[in-house]
Image (cartoon, rainbow, N blue to C red):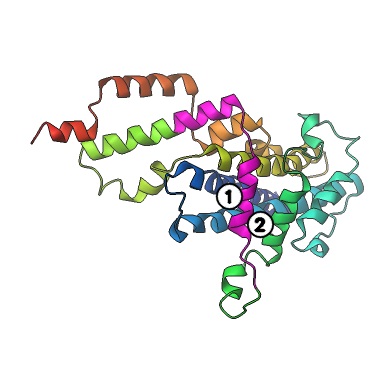
Amino acid sequence: MTSRWSNLVAETQFSTELVRSGISRVSALPMSGDRPDSRIGYDETFPLNVGLHMYTSGLERLCKLALACHGYATTGEFVKVKKYSHKLSGLLDAVEQLDMSAFKPYCPEYLNRPDDEFGDELVVWLERYASGDGRYELLDSLTRDDVEILTWDVWVQFCSRGTVTNDVNESIGIRNAMSEALVAVTVANDLESVAHLFWESTSRSFHAPAVAVGLAMYRRARWAAEVIGSVTHYTGKGLPILREVVNVLTQTTDNFFAYEVAGISDREPVVEELSRHFATSVPFEEEHDSDR
């Protein structure tokens, strides 16, 4: 095993986890349409920056890996990708121009440029963030009066246009019920202090508008991931089989949300357990009312 082999695996693991984690963060953002007063505090909006920072870095790295590995698989040399910098549109254009005719992808349809209700506007917004204008807009606003704070407002606009499938809607309902059940069990058993470290992720709710944009971001990353998986599959040229790493990003959109974002291990037993829990549990407020 060469250092290059190990470096490829490690970089692919890094990129894949950045994308998965970034999408998970943005998919759980609070949306004003779900609130009676339509107000969201700054302490709730900062996860958008966290999620975008992870995702855009991960997407950039996946695209660069796809280009580099394609070059090695076809010419024996890795393509130099530093010239692309953080320009996601240029990277995605370069991925689209790759000749994939010599390779056998698992899912050929994933090699097509994603086409959805967000189009190129989503990539433009992501690139603005990745290149620095969005990523540093809050810091820049401290010393400049001409800085536009656009990241959250554009995010909300995208969310207003997004739709999810019935399957994803069902997974959102199951995941939110999982959170409710875990929180209820924790409180009922006086384990709040024990569970403190896990509370934020356990109690996180998902909202369809945010999930819709998160899954559009996923489809763009899946495109690059499928290229990586295809061009490194038993090449006989010393490349690791990177599909074993990127496989979490080469699922259907519905499955990716259910398994990788919502954390639903197996829908049927999860639903059965939740049904038993809610059928037998006493609501926390009701239980404490009876003690008065």
Find the magenta span and give its range. Answer: 147-175
**Residue 38, relative to residue 110: is it above or below?**
below
Residue at 83% x, 47% y is 95
Q: Is residue 106 above or below residue 7?
A: above
State the residue position of label 2: 57
Amino acid on which disc 1 is placed = Gly
Above or below 169: residue 60:
below
User: Would you identify the image quadrant in which residue 280 lies?
Assistant: top left
Instruction: Check disc 2 and give the amino acid type.
Output: Ser
Q: CA distance from mark 2 to mark 1?
A: 9 Å
Residue at 28% across, 35% down: 184
Label 2 residue SS? helix
- Classified by dominant secondary structure, the portion drawn in magenta counts as helix
Locate residue 151 relative to residue 76 in the image: left or right: left
User: Which residue in the structure is indicated by mark 1?
Assistant: 22
Q: Position of residue 53 (x, y in %)?
A: 60, 58
